[in-house]
Amino acid sequence: MLLTIRTTHVPATDLGFLLGKHPDRFQTKSLAFGKAHVFYPEANEKACTAAMLLEINNIKLQKNKRQQFSASFKLADYVNDRAYAASSFLSNALAKVLGSALNGNCKERPDLVNQSIPLEVKLTAVPARGGLELIHRLFEPLGYEIEAQTTVLDSAFPAWGDSPYYNLCLRKTATLQSVLTHLYVLIPALDNKKHYYVSQAEIEKLLAKGEAWLKDHPEKNLITKRYLRYRNNYVRRALNQLLEEEEPSPKASASEDQLEQPLKLHDLRHETVITTLKELGVQSVIDLGCGSGKLLRHLIKEGQFTKIHGMDVSHQAIEVALDRLYLRDAGPLKKERIKLFHGSLTYCDQRTKGFDAAVLVEVIEHLDESRLDTLQQIVFGYAEPDHVIITTPNREYNVLFEGLPFGKFRHSDHRFEWTRTEMENWATAVAKQYDYHVKFEPIGPIDEQHGAPSQMAVFKKKK
Amino acid sequence: MTIQIPEMSLVAMVGITSSGKSTLARQLFKPTEIISSDYCRAIVSDDENDQSASKDAFDLLHYIARKRLQRGKLTVVDATNIQKSARKTLIDIAKEQHVLPIAIVLNIPRKKCENRHQERTDRNFGLHVLRHQYRALKRSISQLKREGFRYVYVVDSEEEAQLLQIERTKLYNDRKEWTGPFDIIGDVHGCFEELKILLEKLGYHIKQTDQYFGYEVTPPTGRTAIFVGDLVDRGPASDKVLRLVMSMTVNGSGISVCGNHDAKLLKKLQGKNVNLKHGLAETWQQLEKETPAFKEELKQFLSGLISHYVLDRGRLVVAHAGLREEMQGRASGAVRSFCMYGETTGEVDEFGLPVRYDWAREYRGKALMVYGHTPVVQAEFYNNTIDVDTGCVFGGSLTAMRYPERSLVRVPAKATYAEPGRPIEESTRTDEADEGLLHLEDILGRRTLFTRFGKNVVIQEENSIAALEVMSRFAINPKWLIYLPPTMSPTEVSEENEYLEYPKEAFDYYESMGQTHVVCQEKHMGSRVMVIVGKSQEAVEQRFDVKEGGIGVVYTRSGRAFFDDKSMEQALLKEVQKALTATGFWESFETDWVLLDCELMPWSAKAQSLLREQYAAVGSAATLALSEVEAVLAQARERGIQAEKDLQISQRKQLVKQYQNIYGAYCWPVEKLEDYKLAPFHILATEGKVHTDQSHEWHMEHLHAICRACPPNGMKASHILKATDYRVVDVTDEKSRAEATKWWLELTQANGEGMVVKPQQFLAKNEDYLVQPAIKVRGREYLRIIYGPEYTLAENMQRLRKRKTSKKRRMALSEFVLGLEALERFAQKEAFRRVHECVFGILAMGSEPVDPAL
């Protein structure tokens, strides 16, 4: 909420010209989100400090966007750090209040614009999502001398540790414009949030402000991604333009969980499941827990499957899948062959009946173990397809994943991960109860001691 | 002439073009009851005469007819209907929908029709068409009855048509206006002694007499016995049973529906060739001594037995072998056959008996379906059905179900009079693959939930969609979820300058809603939890049909487990159980389990990451920023530069401190059981009872006793249970109000969250309208957690004063009645899906966007 810029350039009051703001006045400008005040706590020959103070009113912001209550923490709209932290509001204020300086214009003293002067920038409550280390990674390559200071989260609860916010002091001898462009881009990147919807125009803004320096910044990928809020196509376009490359860079993955990435386990799983289904001579198949349709996309290509349905408990995932599989505007034949629906593995649903095979790829571990009882009744007792294929991680393999702390699961939503024996015990009991044969197969490279990263059970109904 | 038209019927107008069908139909029926083929033709093709559109037009006509009939609406088909095939389709639809097909024939002289036709400008075909039609009509008239029309009314002239009137009649099975109470008795099969004992147990006086058919039965006041049929065969005294039931029928103390054995006896009496198997031989022998006159009476009696009754405003249905919902209150051969034999597919089992399809498994009817026919070891409520045939004649017992009490009365058989054709098995339903499973169709889509509180609740489809994932992946086993608490509205904005919420508005609200007294309860700041705890693990697991190895459960307002650590949960429940045992709760409430509505503290126990990542983080950001701002402004001021208006930085710093102070008040570390505090404030339900008929004072008094309970062995009272401070306020008395306001100010100044104001009665009404079950009045400091540290700045207060509570209150009431409905259904052992649909509805309503700060 507070930015101060100090120079010891002689005469220091030239800063007033550069900023286009008179050092002896307290100026206030109204902005959409509140007010910006510009004033000079010191202004003499030797040193001059300009301050921009933002007054952001959460309660006023709320009135403007009443309906957008976030699901995770519903009070976040009222109780949040926006009034205090350095965020995209600051970038916005830079453009609105100090726009000429940001763009390198100075009517009265154009000579000053390209002059490097000693600058000391102070920012309060910079939210560094990525910690102090990230602050260094972002500002050091640009030649800043960094001083950062934080406080405890709450002095009454020392056990809670330190605040994730820093009061920053950055020093560099440079043109004022270059420093402002750095702040303009890097503050929202550190904050990793934006107070407005990111549209295509943001690419242009980023390229304009980052033109001179972003290309050579070692963290340009991270900065671009965060600045453009992980909108992959935007990120790709921005990076291409920045680097003036012809070829699109490899898919920028926003996935948090890249543990399994080197193995391409996901693809391997799908390949194995599809091969198995083909060998079984299955024609109709239902993907229970189809998510956004990754497996379905492969199944669709195989002519053997004449009826391919997908179900997921997340309505949003189904919506995404409908887009990804181009089902919304598909012809009647395709629509007849491929159907997606919102449903749940803990409720009986007529639509799950009558399939040759049901597949549950990495699904069961997303349910509490105590609910598996219901799941098996639904899948084996109620839907009762001829074949059921279930895959789930093999916990024993976890030790081989670098970066996965001991005892942790591969995904934060996993409610359990099984060893091979645990999986086999469960599947064997289920097969017995519901009159199925079952066999097991590993998926992925096999480690002698720990087995394969994923495991598959293939059930076949006894005639 | 007046003709009778049963309410449940499909009426076919039959007559040639221009014979006046449409005019007559309009004269006899409501416009919406008539579907005309011309109109359907116009709808699909824009042209009433476009014969190429006929197929589509009739598809549409049949579709509409089916939809209306499914809803039990009288439907009139206005088409020529002179072709047999056209009529057959209508008869098929009537059968399929179990309504009576009726024909009204316009047999108007051809000449008349021709004259009228020629006057019309809207028909473009020649007279030869009418001649063809007329011939077809003549051929048809005598066939109609044989084709299956139950009633055929022929109108021979225009004059007759003009004078024609209808009388709408109810079906015999429609006894909805009869509300009981009833005693519904299972298959008697000639077990006279047991029946007598049972009736006496139920309070009926039986006296032998010369009147009636030998018995004079006096029922307990207002009650009526209903027999589910199969009065005769196999047992020792079918004759006496018949005499008793016939006597009861005559004097109005009992009625019976028709069982398959009763129907067979009637056939025998009518002289038809009937196989004397399955006990009919014994009955026949017992009847041998009876006079022909009695046999004639018996014939009358038996042929007067109807297939089923729909009673008590449609809430109760009685049929011998049961009846699917869509067939209830209807009439067709299929209905009668279903009522007598149940659902069969023709398949026979190893005993050569028809395999009975368990229709009750899929029963979703709103009416309680009481039936017999299939002997079971024990009568059990299942999916809102109950089979009361407990095989008395096979040595089991004779059972009656009292309605509306839903209690069972049993009399054991004195002997085994016959061997069953197949063994009577213990209820196999618990072994069924989908026992206890819930069906998606019972929760998804836009649904209207009917409650017994005079308020029905509509759940929007998008809200159910949002709730499905929560219920499927995050909630605990839904078997535990018999209740979720409603949302609670705050007061209207206070008139006091400094306060957003203040007691006055809550008192005013209840006063305006006709309440003189309210109960003010201290509001704790923690997490709202529901606590189910049993007297023992076995008891609670049996009642809730779960096998999870615990004495109960603690769940949050969104149905999730409060504790990640199961052992901590069980330890806490153990404490509650101890206190309940020590106060003799199980005995005095005659229960094995209880559901308590509570607040569990500290807030930090569940909201740890929220506190650190949101609340404390905001505080620390403010601290970091505001000090710097203050310094820089001071520096500028020294130079003589300052803002026109005070930026209130030091004041804001102070507000942030107050904010940190208030959330801090609700945080303390929890490492062991004793660190938790549990404050129960409602005893919601125990076995068979929902305690919403008790006042809030009653709840408070009982809970205070429990919270202060000292275990008998001299151990200290539980440190975990916390009694909630409360007081009763007379809202019409200024002094009483002032005292309560003072109490509230003290509470909130000491960092309390505030108070909840409730009407004295749990379920309070203002005339016919339900009153808010609770209104919260939150403290000035507490609200910093809700509206941010600086909400008390004048400018902010001004904005917040515009908040609206009406939507929140609407939601609160809907969720409240759904919650109580769920509990009532659970208490009455209704099908679990009926409990679940209410609970799911509450969860779904939670996804409706409402200002979360309210």
Image (spheres, coloured by chain):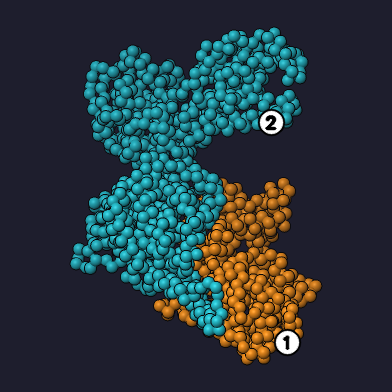
Chain colours: A orange, B cyan
Q: Position of residue A140 (x, y in %)?
A: 64, 86
Q: CA distance from mark 2 to mark 1?
A: 80 Å
Q: Quadrant of residue B77?
A: top right
Q: Quick one: SS at disc 1?
A: loop
Q: How many marks?
A: 2
| Label 2 Cα neighbours within 10 Å, binned few <14 / some 14-19 / many ≥20 | some
Q: Nearer the viewer, residue B16 or B656?
A: B656
Vertical placement of A193 versus B152: above or below? below
Q: Which residue is mark 2?
A: B43
Q: Which residue is mark 1?
A: A115
Q: Nearer the viewer, mark 2 or mark 1?
A: 1
Q: Amino acid at mark 2?
A: Ile
The residue positioned 37% from the left and 40% from the top of the image is B767
The residue positioned 40% from the left and 23% from the top of the image is B305
Judge left or right: residue A59 versus residue B216. Answer: right
Q: Position of residue B521 (x, y in %)?
A: 32, 58
Judge left or right: residue B58 versus residue B835. Answer: right
Q: Quick one: SS at disc 2?
A: helix
Q: Position of residue A295 (x, y in %)?
A: 65, 60
The residue positioned 54% from the left and 67% from the top of the image is A57
Q: What chain is tagged by disc 2?
A: B
